[in-house]
């Protein structure tokens, strides 16, 4: 077998130009070069052996699509920099466990799609740089790789975060002690990820950061203060308990949507629950829900939360459409400050028996109590005038419709309700009568 021992050999240069080594041999050995040019081995598929014992810098697209049949010798302990797409769609990595003690800088997309990579450790790596055209792309650093474990204790880069581990389906745990930046879809699709610790992360502003992490059980985000991104934990079906004691303000849409295993949530400083926030969180219990400062509940906020049996709040002033829709085991609700109620708020809450609304509600929209067949007590203690109502507000609310269910209103407004064309068809009593009962 012909051995190529100098990068400057004329035959080798010709082989690089044509991307064909069949005329000069299939073994490439060079103990001189330390830095290669961009695309150096890109597209070469007929090498049997590759040895670069003194290389320290791996260029952009250096091994893009490169196929080596037998063996590769790259001194990983000497590598200081790796460029964009360096190993994309290649089989150059023969040992799936990489330790890079000298690495300090690496470009985005470097190991994207590298299925042979199983573990990665770079104790000195801090810098991530974005490649310039044509070395830019939306792929993350390790996106779609076979990565199972990862260690880079000094990394702290917003550039690293975006899609960094997306679809790394074998990754089981991650600890990033310095990382302060979130990233869009950073862990999206990491279906084997069980434990995750980001002790310095303070904000989540990019969508789907942990979406689809179906095995995630242990999550540590002690310094997190804000989640404004969409669907941050969507589909984390194994997540049972979450406590975010420092998070304030309003969460992002769909934050916990589809977290079907979620039982307890503690958000003591959050003031707003947006649309679809706990949509289909079917294991979430009333006792496990701690949201004492929340003032608004968005549309479908608790849609399909079938383990909720009661819900009480003295701070909530508004609910969006379908807020509690399909909470089939919800029996009693007390919203003592509620002033605005959306359409279908309690639709299909088939076990709902008693609702107390204490704010000055001025209007009830369509299907608010649709198919609430068990509803027997509705208390409107805070209204100051007869609210507007539609013909569909109580559709399917059997007991209210047949008069066995009772609507209690302030004593001074009983006659006004009874005189109203729509309200007058229901059984109306004063709140003092309820208190006596």
Image (cartoon, grey):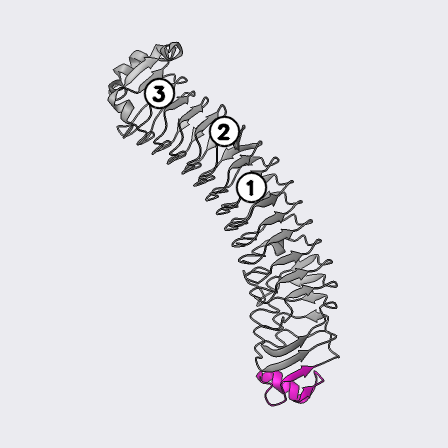
Location of residue 375 in the rendering, given as x and y in whole percent from the top left corner:
33, 25
Pointer 2 local density, CA inside 10 Å: few below 14, some 14–19, many at least 20: many
Location of residue 43 in the rendering, given as x and y in whole percent from the top left corner:
56, 77
Quarter where residue 357 is shown: top left
The residue labelled by disc 2 is 295
Pointer 3 local density, CA inside 10 Å: few below 14, some 14–19, many at least 20: many
In the picture provided, is 120 more to the left or to the right than 330? right
- Residue beneath the point at 27% across and 26% down: 398
Q: Which residues are magenta?
A: 1-29
Location of residue 103 in the rendering, given as x and y in whole percent from the top left corner:
72, 63
The residue labelled by disc 3 is 377
In the picture provided, is 9 more to the left or to the right than 138? right
- Residue beneath the point at 51% across and 47% down: 236
Whether residue 327 appears in magenta in the rendering, the answer is: no
- Residue beneath the point at 46% across and 44% down: 258
Q: Given contact means CB atoms under 8 Å apart, are the residues at marks 3 and 2 in contact?
A: no
Q: How far is disc 2 from disc 1 in space, using C-alphas?
A: 17 Å
Image quadrant occupied by the C terminus: top left
Quarter where residue 3 is shown: bottom right
Label 3 or label 2, whichever comes before in sequence order: 2
Image quadrant occupied by the N terminus: bottom right
Of circles 3 and 1, which is in front? 3
Secondary structure of the residue carrying tag 3 is: strand
Secondary structure of the residue carrying tag 1 is: strand
Number of numbered tags placed on the structure image: 3
Label 2 or label 1, whichever comes before in sequence order: 1
Secondary structure of the residue carrying tag 2 is: loop
Label 3 or label 1, whichever comes before in sequence order: 1
Q: Which mark is residue 127?
A: none
Q: Which mark is residue 227?
A: 1
Quarter where residue 433 is shown: top left
């Amino acid at each position: 077998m012909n051995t190529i021992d100098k990068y400057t050999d004329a035959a080798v240069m010709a082989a690089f130009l044509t991307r064909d080594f069949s005329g000069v041999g299939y073994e490439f050995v060079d103990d001189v070069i330390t830095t290669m040019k961009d695309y150096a081995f890109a597209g070469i598929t007929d090498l049997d052996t590759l040895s670069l014992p003194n290389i320290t810098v791996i260029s952009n697209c250096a091994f893009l699509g490169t196929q080596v049949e037998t063996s590769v010798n790259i001194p990983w302990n000497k590598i200081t920099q790796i460029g964009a797409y360096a190993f994309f769609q290649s089989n150059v990595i023969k040992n799936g466990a990489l330790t890079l003690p000298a690495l300090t800088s690496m470009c985005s997309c470097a190991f994207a799609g590298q299925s042979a990579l199983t573990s990665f450790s770079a104790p000195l790596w801090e810098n991530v740089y974005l490649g310039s055209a044509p070395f830019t792309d939306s792929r993350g650093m390790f996106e779609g790789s076979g990565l199972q474990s990862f260690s880079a204790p000094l990394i702290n880069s917003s550039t690293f975060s975006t899609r960094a581990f997306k679809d790394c389906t074998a990754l089981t745990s991650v600890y990033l002690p310095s990382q302060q930046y979130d990233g869009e879809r950073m862990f999206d699709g990491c279906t084997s990820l069980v434990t995750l610790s980001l002790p310095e992360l303070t904000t989540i502003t990019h969508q789907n950061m942990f979406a689809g992490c179906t095995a995630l059980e242990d999550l540590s985000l002690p310094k997190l203060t804000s989640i404004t991104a969409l669907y941050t934990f969507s589909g984390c079906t194994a997540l049972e308990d979450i406590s975010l004691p420092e998070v304030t303000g309003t969460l992002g849409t769909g934050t916990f949507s589809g977290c079907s295993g979620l039982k307890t949530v503690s958000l003591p400083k959050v003031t707003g629950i947006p649309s679809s926030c706990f949509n289909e969180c079917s294991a979430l219990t009333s006792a496990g829900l701690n949201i004492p400062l929340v003032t608004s509940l968005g549309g479908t906020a608790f849609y399909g939360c079938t383990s909720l049996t009661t819900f009480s709040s003295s701070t909530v002033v508004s609910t969006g459409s379908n807020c509690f829709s399909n909470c089939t085991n919800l029996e009693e609700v007390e919203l003592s400050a509620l002033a605005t109620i959306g359409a279908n708020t309690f639709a299909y809450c088939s076990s709902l028996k008693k609702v107390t609304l204490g704010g000055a509600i001025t209007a009830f929209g369509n299907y608010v109590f649709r198919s609430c067949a068990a509803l027997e007590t509705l208390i409107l203690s805070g209204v100051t005038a007869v609210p507007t109502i539609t013909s569909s507000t109580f559709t399917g609310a059997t007991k209210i419709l047949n008069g066995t269910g009772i609507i209690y209103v302030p004593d001074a407004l009983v006659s006004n309700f009874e005189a109203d064309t729509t309200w007058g068809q229901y059984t109306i009593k004063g709140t003092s009568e309820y208190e006596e009962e």
